[in-house]
Image (cartoon, rainbow, N blue to C red):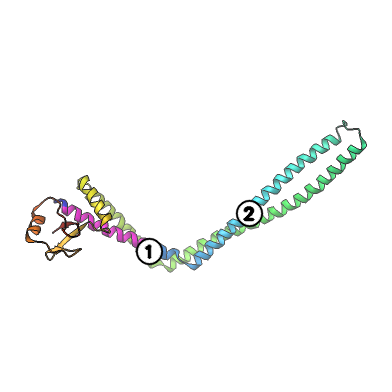
Amino acid sequence: MSEALNLFRLQNLDTHIDRSINRIDEIDRILSDSQVIKQAQKALEQAEEEMKKIRIELHQIEDKVESQTIKRKTTQAALFSGNIKNPKELQDLSMESEALKRYISQLEDEQLEAMVAFEVAEETELQAKKNLEQAKGTTAEQNAALLGERNNLSAELERMLREKEAVIQSIPPEKLSLYQKLRKQKKGTAVAAVSLGGCSICGQALTPADQQAIRASNQIIFCPSCGRILYEG
C-alpha cells in the first residue's frame, strides 16, 4: 500500500474527526446556552458567595468570643487571686470583668444570629444546586434529539480514533511529521485527491507526466501550486 494512500486515508479520518469534534462542541454550546440554566447557575453562585461571606463573619465572631472569654478569665483570676490589695485596682478589675461579660453576651447573641444566617444560607445553596440540576434535566429532555446526535457522534468519534491509530502505525514517522506540518499550514487539509486531471483543492491542472508519476511512484508527490500531497485512487 502506497504512502500517499495511507496519508489520504489518514486525511479522510482527520477531516471526519474534526467535523465530529466541532459538531459535539456546537451541541454542547447549544445545550449549555439555556437562560433557565444560566439563571439557576447565577442563583447558585450568589448563594455560594453569601454563604462564604457569612462563614467569614461567623468565624470572626467566634474568634472574638474566644479572645474576650480568655481575657475575662484572666481578669477574674487576677481579681480573686488575693494578690491585689488596692481597693481602686480591685474595683477597676471588677468593672472590667462586668464590661467583658456584657460584651461577650453581645458577641454570643451576634454569634447565634450568624449561625442561624449560615444555616439559612446553607439551605439556600442546597436548594440552588437542586434547581440547577433540575434546570439541566429539563433542558436535556427538551434537547433529547441533540443528545442522541451527540451520543452517536461520540461513538463514531471513538471508532474513528481507533482506526486512525491503526493507520498511523503504517506511516513512517518522517512522513507523519510532514503530514502534520502540512495540516497546520494548509487549514487542515494536507492531502488532495487528483480529480479530472488536477488538484481537487486548488484546481491546478497536472501534466500527464505528473499524473503518471503519482500513479506509479511510491514516493510523495506534491501539487506544484498549493504544495499539498497528491493522491490518485
Front one among 110 and 95: 95
Residue at horizontal 69%, vertical 53%?
114
From the viewer's side, name the closer residue of 141 and 119: 119
Residue 198, how many percent across, how many down? 14, 63
Q: Main secondary structure of the magenta part?
A: helix
User: Which quarter of the figure has residue 89?
Assistant: top right
Left of 66 or right of it: where is 232? left
Residue 165 point in image, percent of width and height: 26, 49
Q: Earlier in the sequence, mark 2 or mark 1?
A: 1
What's under tag 2, amino acid-wise?
A: Lys
**Residue 36, relative to residue 229: is it above or below?**
below
x, y percent for residue 46: 58, 60
The spot of residue 178 in percent (x, y) is 22, 50
Mark 2 residue crowding within 10 angstroms, few (<14) / some (14–19) / many (20+): few
Kindly indicate the quadrant of the structure image that contains residue 20.
bottom left
Residue found at the very far right of the displayed protein: 87
Q: Secondary structure at mark 1?
A: helix
Residue that mark 1 sits on: 26
Looking at the image, residue 141 lies above or below residue 231 = below
Find out whether the residues at labels 2 and 1 contact each other: C-beta distance under 8 Å.
Answer: no
The disc at residue 53 is 2
Residue farthest along the front direction in this orientation: 225
Tell me if residue 172 is in the magenta stretch: no
- Assess whether residue 5 is covered by the magenta stretch: yes
Q: Is 7 positioned to the left or the right of 87 in the image?
A: left
Say which mark, if any, is on residue 138: none
Point out the stretch of residues depicted in magenta.
4-27
Taking the spot 7% from the left edge, 61% from the top edge, the residue there is 208
